[in-house]
Structure formats: structure tokens, C-alpha cells
Amino acid sequence: MPDTVPHDVLIVTGMSGAGRSTVANALEDLGWYVVDNLPPQMLRPLVDLAVHPGSALPRIAAVVDVRGGKLFADLAAIIAELRSRDTVRVVFLEATDAALVRRFEQVRRPHPLQEDGTLLDGIARERERMLEVRELADIIIDTTEFNIHQLATTVTEVFSPQGSPGVKVTLESFGFKYGTPTDADIVADARFLPNPFWQPELRAATGLEAPVSEYVLAQEGATEFLAAFEAMLRPVLAGYARENKRHATIAIGCTGGKHRSVALIRELADRLHVHPEVSVTVKHRDLGRE
């Protein structure tokens, strides 16, 4: 695996069926602006946009392939021209004939160059047309043995900015009486702790306020729960990163989503913030509904 850093403009090309869509989606998840099925002749203005001072699109990836028909014939010359004046990198995706045939058969679609022949005829024509572009590639990825998750993970490893978090985590408090969050990956229940609602001096306050937070965290089992929950999340989040699951929602609920869950989510956020491989966002879904 080559060591690289993100560049302003990336051209993604290669064999049909080798995973261009998966690579495009992974790059989008990393914050790249991705243009699919771009005619090669449009690369010049795209590069001009990317390198223009103050551009709102600092990282652009263009997917270019034989779907461009006769326009694709100019790709190699255009790449050479662009490299004479700007930083442009080319990623070429390939796979064995057997792997490509299997993938086309799974989706029951013809090869774009198949015409009246077989899948192998179309693949052979494409390989011939791709030879010159392949020679210009900075990175060649053979996806024969990859599933879509492994390919996305490879893209993330190569093109993630230095020091970027592996998983973006949303920590969400909620009230069970309003329903469990449908998008939560992990749900914990804070109703094992005494409810501050029954303390007259705390009833109107929320878990964002110190008296409620201190009350909740002082209860038997509260700090033990947080320590165990954090310890459980470490291998889970590391596994998410390996499986290219880049976003995770972790929810803690109490009865109304006002006191206990809010206080615990705030404390958990403070604990996870110390892990550089995790980016944390806090959401209190039901706060203010009562």
C-alpha cells in the first residue's frame, strides 16, 4: 500500500466492474467533491476550479471511464497536459477477467463494450483501450479479492488526511417515552439510576446543569456504568473503523430524556474526546419536550 497524502485533483478510472462507484462513495465520505462519468475534455475546467485561489472545492475527484465513448480516447493526452501545470493524480482500478465476469453476472448487466459479443469480449476491448491510461496511473488497486467494504477501507487508508478521526460518533440522549432512536447503532438504558424528577429542587432543571449532573453521577453504579460503557465502546469503534463504518450513533435513554441520559451523555462525550481516532458530536433529542 503506497503512502500518499490527499491531492487537489484525483482522476479515478479503470476497468468496468472493478469498483469505481465504491471508490467514489468512499471519497465522498472523506469530504471529496466527486464528479461521476465526466467526459475527459471537462477535466481542464475542473482542475482550473480546484486550483483557483479561494476555491470552495479544494479536493475534487473525477470518475472517468469508457462510458464516455469516443471522448475517452483523449484521456491519456489530457492527463499528460494537466500534469504539466498542476498536481493531478490517477487511481486505476483493475481485477481479473474471472472477477469482472462474476460481478457483471451478479448485477445482470452487459459490459459497456460488449456489443454483440460476450462479456469476455467486452472486457478484452476495454483492457486494450485502458493500456495507455494504466501506464499513467499513480496508484493501481487490484480489487479481485476485495468486497466493497474492503475496497472502501483501502481508499480511506490511502486518502484520509493525516490525523483524521476514524469514526464520527454522535452521542444522543433521548426519552424512552418518546420512542427509541431508529438510527441508533448502540442503545443503553439509564433508568437503573434514581430519577432526579422526584427531587423537587431538581425537577425543573436538566442534565446540562451542574446540580442535576452532580446528582446523577453521584448515584451508585453511575461512574461504574460509564467506565464499563467506555471500555466496551473502544473495541467496537475500532472495529467500525476497520469495517469502514465511518459514522456511528450511540444513544442513552431515560424516561423523559431530560435528566439522567443528558448528564451521562455529556460525561461520556468528555471521556471519548480524549481519543484522537474518534470525532464526537452531542445531540439531546428530547430535551425541552416536557
Image (cartoon, helix red, strand yellow):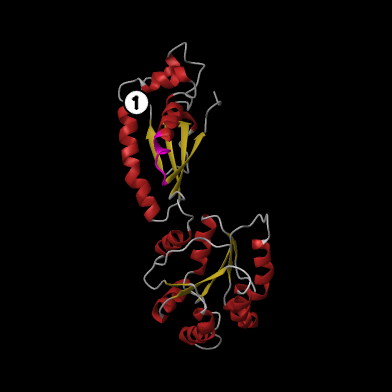
Q: Secondary structure at mark 1?
A: loop
Q: Which residue is mark 1?
A: 192
Quadrant location of the C terminus? top right
Q: Which quadrant of the structure image shows residue 68?
A: bottom right
- The residue located at (52%, 78%) in the rendering is 136
Is residue 205 among the parts visible in the rendering?
yes
Report crowding for label 1: few under 14, some 14 to 19, many 20 or more residues within 10 A (C-alpha): few
Q: How far across and how far down the image is residue 258, in percent?
A: 48, 25
- The residue located at (37%, 20%) in the rendering is 194
Q: Who is closer to the viewer here, 17 or 51? A: 51
What range of the chain is rendered magenta? 271-277
Q: How far across and how far down the image is residue 174, in percent?
A: 47, 32
Q: Is residue 48 magenta?
A: no
Q: Amino acid at mark 1?
A: Phe
Is residue 195 among the parts visible in the rendering?
no
Relative to 73, say whether 166 is above or below. above
| Residue 163 relative to residue 78: left or right | left
Q: Residue furthest top?
A: 200
Q: Which quadrant of the structure image shows residue 2?
A: bottom left
Dominant secondary structure, magenta? loop
Relative to 250, say whether 256 is above or below. above
